[in-house]
Image (tube, rainbow, N blue to C red):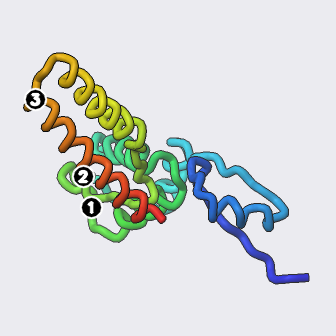
Amino acid sequence: MGTPMAAAMDPDNRRVRIQRLLWRFQKTIKLKLLTREQTQCWLERRPIRFSSPRVREAFVRAIEQDSGGVPAAIEGMLQAAANDGEVTPASIRAYRHEAGTRYFDMTPLLVLVLIGFMAMRYVSRGIGEMELLVLSSVASALFYGLMLVLRRLGR
């Protein structure tokens, strides 16, 4: 029997090279995001000093929003706050963690921009506007070049 192995993956991650590795794992466990009550339990076990009860509530709300419920993000932010002397209203926003960061997929927007540039070329040709035709052609060429560079960077 081999060495036990575990891996963690975001369900939104659709990269082919990662998907190819998943069949090797015998079991899949879905982890739920942590709730506000679980954050409160952590605070009760490891007390953190707050300048006021209002700051405590604002801190818990900020942790909840910034972490997105990701356990590693909550744990990291709470430990950073525990290492400091006291949490004040000014220091609440300083506690951030990369695990809670979510990214927005811009691919549909880029496709719409490309379609817009191509449509501008045909419209400008139809109305006989030479400046718009040149502008849209240059924009389309730049966009195609940008897409080529982004594709190569994505590999």
Q: Is the residue under label 2 in contact with that under label 3 (CB below 8 Å)?
A: no
| Dot 2 amino acid type | Ser
Residue at the spot of label 1: 86
Residue 78 shows up from this direction: no
Residue extending farthest right = 1
Mark 3 and mark 1: span between their CA atoms?
65 Å
Q: Quadrant of the N terminus?
A: bottom right
Q: Are marks 1 and 2 in contact (CB under 8 Å)?
A: yes
Secondary element at image label 3 = helix
- Relative to residue 25, is residue 89 depicted above or below? above
**Percent of width and height locating residue 61:** 38, 41
* Residue 98 spot, x, y in % from top left: 40, 60
- Circle 2 packing at 10 Å, graded few (<14), some (14-19), many (20+), is few
Q: Which mark is residue 73?
A: none
Q: Nearer the viewer, mark 3 or mark 1?
A: 3
What whole-number distance in Å separates the C-alpha atoms at marks 3 and 2?
66 Å
Question: Where's residue 8, x and y in %?
Answer: 63, 62
Q: Decide: is 98 above or below 41.
A: below
Looking at the picture, which amino acid does disc 3 mark?
Met
Mark 3 and mark 1 in contact? Answer it, CB < 8 Å: no
From the viewer's side, name the closer residue of 144 and 100.
Answer: 144
List the residue tagged with mark 3: 130
Closest to the observer: 133 or 64?
133
In the rendered image, which residue does mark 2 sit on?
51
Q: Percent from the top left, x then y, of residue 155? A: 48, 65
* Element class at badge 2: loop
14 left or right of 28? left
Horizontal side, residue 52 vs residue 20: left or right? left
Residue at (35, 52) in percent of width and height: 147
- Residue type at mark 1 is Glu
The mark nearer the N terminus, 3 or 1, is 1
